[in-house]
Structure formats: structure tokens, C-alpha cells
Image (cartoon, rainbow, N blue to C red):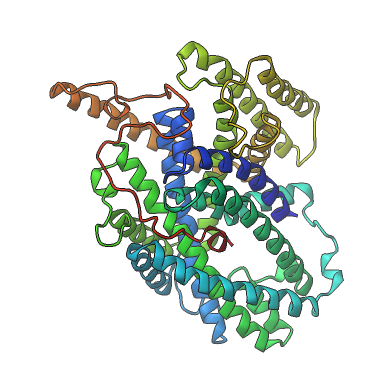
């Protein structure tokens, strides 16, 4: 149920991503969408959270690679780790080596990455089919009773943590600049991959919880250990091989998105130009790839996977929430909007966001029950969504281009679902997010101020966004119109990135 809730939230958000990706087919994904809709500060904070999300997700996946590699040879998942501080600092050298190998592959180019990714994806799908068929023969239906042992609150908490399993479609949007036919390939890749992944996650969850009581599932290598419990050692070996293949392609795609976020932020002058360098030999953001690989490797070597999962989920959810809200605002904001024209949709968006969080916090505090305050908050959600119909939609996509359906209702549902899942993460995760975002905001304000001072001192201040701090966007373009901080070549798009297989 947690995966279904997470998949539903991701599906609603995926529609918003697909519309934005078609209108802005360049590297950057949510960073660009926030830049066009809410301005530079919102884009900077989104870029920081995107980088954190993809980096931590990659580190967590790399540690899973170690667990299954050890299980393949019959060892305990933690046998290859040095426990320094249980459940926090657990040294994993193998994870660091895998990250280094993936970094080298990503630097070599999209074409080489796509070839490798195709082979690994086919292996993964074959093994998943084997797991579902073989595992279904060892299911004990009694293990499904009670079906939701922790109730609705437990389902929400579970969905809040596993949401990072669906970040693959964000990577698709991040790599939009390297897709040959964005208007057709991006919506197909985002939505179809989401559907396939959601179906496979749900089936595999049913299998694993049917094979082993949920309280006894090994979190490091669950399927391999489950088959060993039932003396199906030959399946356990196949599972370990398949898991290694699946984790490899997942790691590859997560790490592909990180450097492109850094590259786009550097192009906009929000990071040093070094991050925007594209290799003349390989056509990839080599410097950014090396940096993100180094950070991912350090986290993968040092930190426990459960801690990493908690850190990444709230960043993912905040980005999903922002993209859904941004889609609504972009539809009701003119392309060359003045502040007076921008204010009406922004006020309605703020009311929608506040009412969604009011309902989510109360719903979570009352253990997934709706109180009178929650009911009032839900009415406010409906009213603020309906209020968009009182002003004209001035920026609807043309009929020939992909458009998310049922706007503003569907994106508003996305804002509500992501708000509920954020509340489900608990106070500590929210505090970590607030602290991290505050630090990033201070860094932006400091950087933007120093940038303006530097430009004024050299008498080169102009109206370009790279020369002044802009808390709000001045327009909502249908394609990027920003003035790059430095001139950069496009990434290698000679051969399309295999977006569907990569996300799966």
C-alpha cells in the first residue's frame, strides 16, 4: 500500500514534469521549472535539494549493491562493512569502488552509458520475472494478516520513505537536452516508466511480505535472504545477480542526473564556471561528474542506508510539491508578466499550499484521522483550487503539445499528497530539511549580494538575471530564455538516451 500511495503521488507529479519537460527540453528538470515559474531563489533552493536528493539516493543504492554482492556468495549483508557507529557510520569500501566505476562510465559519454544500461536493464527485468514467479510458490497468506499492521499512519510513513524509489523520472527530465525527440520521448518515458515501476514494486512487495513476515524481512538484501529462508538457494543466487544488475542501472541513472544539475546552475552563474565545463572529447559535464561522484562515494562509504533514505525522501517530496504548484502558477501567469499580473495566481498558490499543509499536519498528528480542523482545511484546499477558475488561464499549452490534464485539480491533488507524505516523515526529517534549506538560502543571498557588488564595482551591471539577485521570475517562458553566465556547448545528443529502460 505504501508503494501504491507513493506511485500515485509520483504519477500525478509525473504529468506536471512531462508538461514542463516538453516546454523546456534542456538539462536541469525541476531547477529550470522553478526558475521559470518562481524565480532564481526558488530555483537555487530546488537545485540544492535536487543535488542532495540524487546524491544521497545514489549513495544508498551503492550500499545496496554491496549487500547483494555479499549475499551472492552466501555471506551476511554486513559482512563486508566495518561497523564504527551502528546504524549511522558503517564503512563500505565496495560501495565507493562501484561509485567510482559508474563515474568513469558517465564521463565517457551518453552513448556508452546507453549501451551498458540496455544490457543491464534486460537482465534486471528477466530476474524480476523469475523472482515474482518463484516467490509466488512460497507465499504464506497468513503473513498478510493483518494487511496493514500499522494502519493508515503506517502506510503514509512507509510511502514517505520509499518515495525516493520513484526519482527515476526526474532523471529523465534532467537529461532532456540529450533526448533526440523531446516532445514525444519525454512524456512517454516519464509516464510509461512510472507505470511499469509501480506495477513491479507492488508485485514484488506482495511476494516478499507473503514469503516472510514483515517484521523478519532483512532490510539489506531482502529477496536473497527470503529465498534462503525457504531453502531456494538457486533462486537466491539468481536474485543476487539480478539485484546487482538492477541496482547498477539505478545507480547509473541517479548519478547521471547530479552533474547536469550542477552544470545548469553553473551556466546560470549560481555555481563556479568550472562545473559547467563540457568535455570536448566525450561531450559530457566531466568536472561536475567527477565532483558528484566524489561526494556520492564518500557518503556511500560512510553512512548507513536507512539514515540515507530518511535524508533523501523529504527533499524529493518538497521538489514534487513545488513542481505541482509551479504548473498551476505557470498556466495562470502571462509570459511577460508584471508583478501586478503575477500576484493573483501567487496568492492563490500560497493559499493552496498553506491549506494543504494545515490538513496534512493535523491528519498526521491525529494518527490518520480527520478532525473538524482537518475538515475545514480540506474545504480550504478545495476553495483555493477552485479560486483559480475566477481568473483567466493565459498560458495554456498549444493543442499540438503535451499538456497535463485536469489543471488545476490534478496538480492540487499532487500538492496535497506530497504535503501528507512530508508530514508523515516526522519532526526530525522536517527539522533537517528546514536547517539545510535555510543554509542554502543564506548561501544564495550571500552569493547574490557579493555578485551584485562585484558587478557594480566593474560597472557591468545590466538587466540579465545573472547580474542581480532575483527572488521572483519576471516571465514564464515556454522555453528557456535565460542569459547564460558563460557560453556552453550542448551535451552529446547524437544518440538518444534510453530513457524508458534507464528509469526501470
- Determine the residue located farthest toward the left in the rendered image: 458
User: Quadrant of the image for the N terminus?
Assistant: bottom right
Q: Position of residue 106 (x, y in %)?
A: 37, 63
Residue lying farthest to the front in this orientation: 400
The x, y position of residue 362, in whole percent, is 71, 33
Q: In the image, is residue 385 above or below residue 130?
A: above
Q: Point out residue 10 in the picture as x, y percentages from the top left corner.
A: 64, 47
Q: Quick check: 14 above or below 478?
A: below
Find residue 358 and report its image quarter. top right
Total labels: the figure holds 0
Question: Which of these two is toward me, 88 or 247?
Answer: 247
Q: Nearer the viewer, residue 146 or 58?
A: 58
Residue at 79% in and 76% down: 136
One can see residue 85 in this view: no
Identified at 72% across, 21% down, the residue is 386
- The answer to whether residue 267 shows anywhere in this view is yes
Q: Is residue 398 left or right of residue 466?
A: right
Q: Is residue 433 left or right of residue 204?
A: left
Quarter where residue 130 is shown: bottom right
Q: Would you place residue 123 above or below residue 495 in this image? A: below
For the point 49% across and 68% down, which residue is it? 117
Depth check: give the residue in front, 385 or 367.
Answer: 385
Q: Residue at x 52, y 64 (%)?
A: 250
Quarter the C terminus occupies: bottom right
Q: Position of residue 468 (x, y in %)?
A: 29, 24
Amino acid at each position: 500500500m505504501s508503494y501504491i500511495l507513493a506511485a500515485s503521488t509520483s504519477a500525478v507529479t509525473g504529468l506536471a514534469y512531462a508538461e514542463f519537460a516538453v516546454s523546456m527540453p534542456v538539462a536541469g528538470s525541476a531547477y529550470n521549472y522553478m526558475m521559470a515559474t518562481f524565480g532564481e531563489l526558488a530555483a537555487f533552493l530546488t537545485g540544492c535539494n535536487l543535488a542532495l536528493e540524487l546524491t544521497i539516493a545514489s549513495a544508498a543504492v551503492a550500499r545496496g549493491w554491496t549487500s547483494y554482492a555479499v549475499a551472492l556468495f552466501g555471506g551476511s549483508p554486513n559482512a563486508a562493512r566495518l561497523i564504527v557507529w551502528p546504524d549511522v557510520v558503517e564503512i563500505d569500501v565496495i560501495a565507493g569502488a562501484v561509485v567510482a566505476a559508474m563515474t568513469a562510465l558517465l564521463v565517457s559519454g551518453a552513448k556508452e552509458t546507453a549501451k551498458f544500461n540496455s544490457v543491464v536493464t534486460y537482465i534486471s527485468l528477466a530476474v524480476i520475472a523469475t523472482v515474482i514467479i518463484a516467490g509466488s510458490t512460497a507465499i504464506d497468506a497468513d503473513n498478510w494478516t493483518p494487511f496493514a499492521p500499522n494502519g493508515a499512519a503506517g502506510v503514509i510513513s512507509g510511502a514517505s520513505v520509499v518515495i525516493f524509489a520513484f526519482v527515476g523520472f526526474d532523471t529523465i527530465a534532467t537529461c532532456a537536452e540529450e533526448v533526440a525527440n523531446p516532445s514525444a520521448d519525454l512524456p512517454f518515458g516519464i509516464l510509461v516508466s512510472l507505470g511499469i515501476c509501480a506495477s513491479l514494486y507492488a508485485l514484488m512487495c506482495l511476494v516478499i511480505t507473503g514469503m516472510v513476515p514483515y517484521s523478519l524481512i532483512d532490510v539489506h538484501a531482502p529477496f536473497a535472504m527470503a529465498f534462503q529462508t525457504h531453502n531456494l538457494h538457486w533462486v537466491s543466487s539468481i536474485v543476487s545477480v539480478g539485484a546487482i544488475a538492477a541496482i547498477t542501472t539505478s545507480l547509473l541513472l541517479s548519478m547521471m542526473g547530479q552533474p547536469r544539475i550542477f552544470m545548469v546552475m553553473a551556466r546560470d552563474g549560481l555555481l563556479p564556471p568550472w562545473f559547467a565545463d563540457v568535455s570536448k572529447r566525450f561531450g559530457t559535464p566531466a568536472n561536475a561528474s567527477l565532483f558528484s561522484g566524489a561526494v556520492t562515494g564518500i557518503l556511500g562509504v560512510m553512512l548507513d542506508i536507512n539514515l540515507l533514505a530518511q535524508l533523501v525522501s523529504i527533499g524529493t517530496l518538497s521538489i514534487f510539491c513545488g513542481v505541482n504548484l509551479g504548473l498551476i502558477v505557470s498556466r495562470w501567469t502571462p509570459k511577460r508578466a508584471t508583478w501586478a499580473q503575477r500576484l493573483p495566481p501567487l496568492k492563490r498558490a500560497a493559499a493552496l499550499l498553506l491549506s494543504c499543509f494545515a490538513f496534512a499536519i493535523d491528519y498526521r498528528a491525529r494518527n490518520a484521522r480527520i478532525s473538524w480542523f482537518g475538515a475545514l482545511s480540506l474545504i480550504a484546499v478545495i476553495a483555493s483550487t477552485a479560486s483559480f477558475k475566477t481568473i483567466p488561464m493565459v498560458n495554456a499549452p498549444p493543442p499540438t503539445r503535451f499538456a497535463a490534464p485536469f489543471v488545476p485539480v490534478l496538480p492540487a491533488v499532487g500538492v496535497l499528497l506530497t504535503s501528507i507524505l512530508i508530514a508523515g516523515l516526522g519532526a526530525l526529517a522536517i527539522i533537517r530539511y528546514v536547517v539545510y534549506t535555510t543554509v542554502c538560502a543564506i548561501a544564495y543571498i550571500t552569493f547574490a549580494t557579493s555578485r551584485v557588488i562585484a558587478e557594480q564595482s566593474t560597472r557591468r551591471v545590466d538587466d540579465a538575471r545573472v547580474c542581480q539577485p532575483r527572488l521572483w521570475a519576471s516571465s514564464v517562458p515556454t522555453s528557456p530564455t535565460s542569459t547564460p553566465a558563460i557560453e556552453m556547448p550542448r551535451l552529446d545528443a547524437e544518440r538518444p538516451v534510453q530513457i524508458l529502460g534507464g528509469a526501470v
